[in-house]
Image (tube, rainbow, N blue to C red):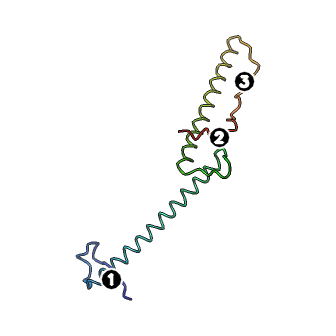
């Protein structure tokens, strides 16, 4: 089987050495096939990386029943809502802390400063709401 002649003068087909029409078509198909294989490999690698990242994210989120694996979009929505809920909890605790701090410095009695609990209870599926 003959190899396709390299294009040594430029990328334009008019500078390529003249090949018979059937050989030119065969080279064109082979080149497209090689490019497609490389593109498929890149896409496969990209999807493996994305799936690995989503699995890592799922392992960090509060767990649901083991048989309920979230889809990609559900995982992203759950993570967004979980981050929002954590932020709100921190914001509320900071607000309560500031109130205690201000009330104790203005003569009120305070028995101590606690940041409170960050637990969300037994229902992590509530974070799935959009």
Q: Which residue is mark 1?
A: 5
Which marked residue is nearer to the observer: mark 2 or mark 1? 2
| Res 112 quadrant in image | top right
Residue 33 is drawn in which quadrant? bottom left
Residue 121, x across and y down, in percent:
69, 36
The location of residue 103, given as percent across then percent down, is 67, 15
Question: SS class of the residue under badge 2?
Answer: helix
Q: Residue at x 65, y 17 (%)?
A: 102
Q: Helix or strand or loop: what does disc 1 sit on?
A: loop
Return the disc, 3 or 1, that comes first in the chain's sequence.
1
Number of callouts in the render?
3
Residue at image x 59%, y 34%? 87
Relative side of 61 to 28, left or right: right
Q: Which mark is residue 113?
A: 3
Viewer-proximal residue among 92 and 94: 92
Q: Residue at x 51, y 60 (%)?
A: 47
Tag 2 residue: 124
Q: Residue at x 44, y 71 (%)?
A: 37
- For this rendering, which residue is in front, 89 or 130? 130
Of discs 2 and 3, which sits in the foreground? 2
Residue 113 in the image, given as x and y percentages of width and height: 72, 24
Q: CA distance from mark 2 to mark 1?
A: 62 Å
Question: Which badge, 2 or 3, comes first in the chain's sequence?
Answer: 3
Q: Earlier in the sequence, mark 2 or mark 1?
A: 1
Is 14 displayed left or right of 116 in the figure?
left
């Amino acid at each position: 089987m003959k190899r396709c002649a390299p294009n040594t003068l430029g990328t334009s087909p008019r500078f390529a050495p003249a090949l018979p029409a059937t050989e030119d078509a065969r080279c064109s198909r082979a080149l497209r096939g090689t490019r497609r294989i490389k593109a498929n490999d890149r896409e496969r690698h990209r999807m493996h990386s994305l799936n690995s990242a989503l699995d890592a994210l799922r392992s960090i989120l509060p767990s649901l029943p083991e048989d309920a694996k979230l889809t990609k979009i559900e995982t992203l929505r759950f993570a967004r809502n979980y981050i929002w809920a954590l932020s709100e909890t921190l914001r509320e605790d900071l607000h309560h802390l500031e109130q205690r701090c201000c009330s104790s410095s203005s003569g009120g009695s305070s028995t101590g400063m606690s940041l409170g609990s960050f637990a969300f209870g037994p229902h992590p599926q509530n974070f799935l709401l959009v």
